[in-house]
Image: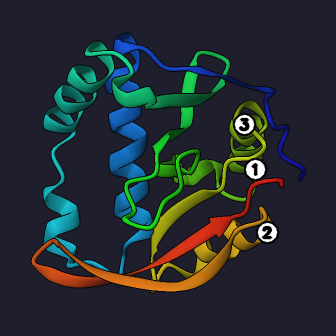
Amino acid sequence: MVQQIEEVTVRVADASDAQAIARVHVRSWQEAYVGILPADYLESLDLEARARRWEQDLREGPQQHVRTWLAQAGSEVVGFLTLGPSRDEDAGRLDLEIYAVYLDPQRWGQGVARDLMRTVVGEVDRRAAISLWVAAANERARHFYRRNGFQADGTERYETVGGIELLQVRYRRPGAH
């Protein structure tokens, strides 16, 4: 049986979207990081606390040109992507960074994340390089980024998440010259 996939709309998020973004954020983490982060940490992710944080971030407005886009199927938020200036020490003036890109696990493999990524990348200055950090052990995400024009650039860092040191790899998509 072929599943009918609803049309997805991509739009900029506002504070009223905080609960829906938090739901996608928590669900995605709880699925994507199984076997990477401790199970008790993933189970402890607090949807309400995450929603309050998102509401505050979205209500304060785009700080330093940070924006969050949503992928929406009908009235349901099924994914989001947050982009802003690169925070890397070696970043150029125009360089951007994807701070977060998450999708409801039930939508994985349906092209929603690809559409979200293409929409956002299409809206930024073509000269801007875009970087992102991904858990080295998250092969599904790494494959997605490679398919969307990003390549690991050899830069790595450790970040403490859930009480463990998580190796992260930087991926970059070069800007047009």
Q: Nearer the viewer, residue 147 or 50?
A: 147
Instruction: Tell me residue 160's x, y (percent).
Output: 17, 75
Q: Say what secondary structure mark 1 lies in.
A: helix
Question: In the displayed structure, would residue 11 be above or below residue 5?
Answer: above
Q: CA distance from mark 3 to mark 2?
A: 21 Å
Instruction: Tell me residue 137's x, y (percent).
Output: 45, 86
Q: Quadrant of the C terminus?
A: bottom right
Q: CA distance from mark 3 to mark 1?
A: 19 Å
| Front position among marks 3 and 2 | 3
Q: Amino acid at mark 3?
A: Asp
Mark 3 and 1 residues: CB-CB less than 8 Å, in contact?
no
Q: Say what secondary structure mark 2 lies in.
A: helix
Mark 2 and 1 residues: CB-CB less than 8 Å, in contact?
yes
The label shown at residue 114 is 1
Question: In the displayed structure, would residue 14 be above or below residue 118?
Answer: above
The label shown at residue 147 is 2
Q: Is residue 175 left or right of residue 54?
A: right
Question: In the displayed structure, would residue 80 be above or below residue 27?
Answer: above
Q: Amino acid at mark 2?
A: Arg
Q: CA distance from mark 2 to mark 1?
A: 9 Å
Could you tell which of marks 3 and 1 lies nearer the N-terminus? 1
Q: Which residue shows up at 33% across the image and 82% down it?
A: 157
The label shown at residue 125 is 3
The colouring scheme, among rainbow, by chain, secondary structure or one colour, is rainbow
Q: Amino acid at mark 1?
A: Arg
Q: Say what secondary structure mark 3 lies in.
A: loop
Q: Which residue shows up at 36% across the image and 76% down it?
A: 34
